[in-house]
Amino acid sequence: MELVLPVLLSALAMTLIIGVRYLLSSGFFAWLTNRIRPGQYSRLELQMGRERRWSLASAAIYGVPAGIVAWGWQNAGWTQIYTDINMYPIWYLPASLFLYLFAHDTWFYWTHRLFHRPSWFRIAHAVHHDSRPPTAWAAMSFHPVEAISGAIVIPALVIAVPIHVGVLAIVLLIMTVMGVTNHMGWEMFPRWLVQGSLGKGLITASHHEKHHELYRGNYGLYFRFWDKVCGTDIGLGTFDDNSARRGNG
Ligand SMILES: [Zn+2]
Ligand SMILES: [Zn+2]
């Protein structure tokens, strides 16, 4: 019983951290969007309010498994997170980064496809697609059911797969930045990357925007691998179409 309070406090602390991380990262890219593409989010105030409320609710859901596992890491040796860089060969650092991203991408792809089955869509995924077009605030705008499916991935991985604490920080950074920028309504990466050979494998805003536009295809998170293997890759979207769709040029 004496474990309940510290674990609860850890979950609360993680909720706060994830909530603040969301407000800072989405806030920064929303600010950047207003600087670079003024008017992009005009007339989307109501939608952005919804996106912020769902996202902050998701922060509380993400905070629970993260808090439990963070407590277990510090106090009970539950995780495979290591701090001594020599514990595994140096090549394992980039390998573990890729492994984590690929595992997360795989989980996301298949659960995302499930969420697009009509019965699941209505229950768990319509909330996320309520963003038309999405904004930087939509990064964590998920129904609680979808938030739970996302919240367990990294905690499960750190229990099962060794990772250096610094690499874990990079995973979380990539997760945060791509979650926001894939929804912000414009492409921040240069054309040579998006249209080039790197862009054939990596997912950026141009790819995910098309998923939000057509409600089907492009289900992946970081890599186009599963979309290509399963024939669900529908190519890259263009953001001009979006402004035309909103009717504000
Ligand atoms: Zn979707
Ligand atoms: Zn999305």
Image (cartoon, grey):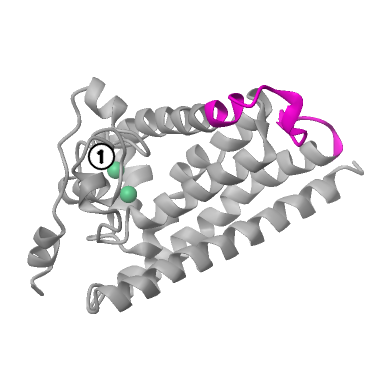
Residue drawn at x 61%, y 30% as measured from the top left: 156
Amino acid type assigned to the residue bearing label 1 in the image: Gly
Task: Check the image and report above or below for 159 versus 140.
Answer: above
Task: Check the image and report above or below for 195 versus 164.
Answer: below
Task: Check the image and report above or below for 109 versus 42.
Answer: above
Q: Is residue 89 magenta?
A: yes
Determine which residue is flagged by label 1: 199
Residue drawn at x 30%, y 25% as measured from the top left: 226
Q: Which type of secondary structure does the marked residue at label 1 adopt?
A: loop
Residue drawn at x 30%, y 58% as measured from the top left: 188
Residue closest to the eye, 127 or 80: 80
From which residue to which does the magenta span run?
A: 75-96
Q: Is residue 87 magenta?
A: yes
Q: Say how many tags the image has.
A: 1
Determine whether, in the image, residue 190 is placed left or right of residue 106.
Answer: left
Task: Check the image and report above or below for 249 versus 224.
Answer: below
Residue closest to the eye, 27 or 200: 200
Quadrant including the N terminus: top right
Determine whether, in the image, residue 54 is placed left or right of residue 206.
Answer: right
Quarter holding residue 125:
top left
Quarter holding residue 137:
bottom left
Q: Position of residue 161 (x, y in %)?
A: 63, 24
Quadrant including the C terminus: bottom left
Residue drawn at x 47%, y 59% as measured from the top left: 55
Q: Position of residue 82 (x, y in %)?
A: 74, 33
